[in-house]
Image: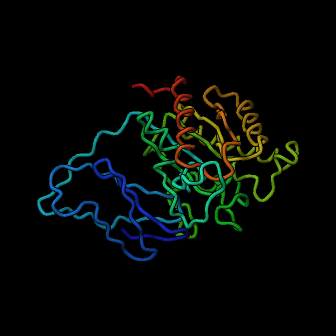
Amino acid sequence: MTNRHCYWSNTLGAIVDGVQKRFDLQNEGRTVIRLLDDGENGEHDIMVFKRADSCHELILEELELSEGGCLLPAPEKPKRRIEVYGDSVSAGEVSEAVHCIGREDPEHNGEFSNSWYSYAWMTARKLNAEIHDIAQGGIALLDGTGWFLEPEAVGMESVWDKVHYNPVLGRQTKWDFSQYTPQVVIVAIGQNDSHPLDYMKENPDGDRARHWRQRYGLFLRRLRSQYPKAHIVCCTTLLEHDPAWDRAIGQVCGELADEKVTQYLFRRNGKGTPGHLRIPEAEEMAEELAAYLGNLEIEGWNE
């Protein structure tokens, strides 16, 4: 692997014969990763995955098999497909800091982040669904707000349709939406939009709040134009935030008058924890979200 480092310490994840492994990556140059030791003959099931958001990018330079080894056909992909647009919680940031359940984050350098334990990936596994997780720590809806690449903050409006979206790591490139068509789209944005000013809490009828609602509605319409048949679920998370943001999301969903655009509020929505979600808290969200999706009539979901 060649790692393109932006911030945090960077790691790679893999599930090898049912066992999860973590591999540290060098900030610069190539890192050689040994997935299996010599002498482990026979058939193996391996999935390599990215543990974190665009704090780094990866290039797979080479896959070397042991002598006499071969690649078998990959298993058939699930029929169910989910896409998630979210922030650090959707990316599984700091999820492995289970010693801090219900508490502020510990000091860290990215070592506790693991997308495998995000509520997004957990929900997909519970429903046997493929997932595309467009999730970035610190991101808000609008450019100039949130924490991602602050002080020149970049919002979801600018990255949702990109493959390489972190401008620090080079030229941004467009995503080809024809390559993946989800039946369910989760929009979990609204958590970081209160930074640097919580205008939705302070003045929900003010110009900035009205502008945010207008742009949030525009974002949903853009998603609808790409996925005319998908069910779009709008939510936030258990991470503490003012409920004015959830009311704003509910207002936009109502104004769209689209029966396939709904809002879901978790049982402990916005009051579950002051820090990022740890594994049990993400599990809580995934249980609720999977049950909610299971009760919807989703086109193509049960084919």
Q: Is residue 170 visible?
A: no
- What quarter of the picture does the C terminus occupy? top left
Q: Estimate the x, y position of residue 31 in percent, counting from the top left.
A: 36, 72
Q: Estimate the x, y position of residue 133 in percent, counting from the top left.
A: 51, 48
Name which quarter of the figure residue 233 lies in: top right
Q: Is residue 77 visible?
A: yes
- Taking 59 as reference, is 194 left or right? right
Question: By what rule are the colours in the image chosen?
Answer: rainbow
- Taking 62 as reference, is 210 left or right? right
* 18 or 125, nearer to the observer: 18
* 171 or 293, nearer to the observer: 293
Q: At 36% across and 68% down in the image, what residue appears?
A: 1
Q: At 77% across and 39% down in the image, what residue appears?
A: 248
Q: Estimate the x, y position of residue 240 in percent, counting from the top left.
A: 71, 47
Residue closest to the far left: 68
Q: Is residue 110 above or below residue 276?
A: below
- Taking 136 as reference, is 256 left or right? right
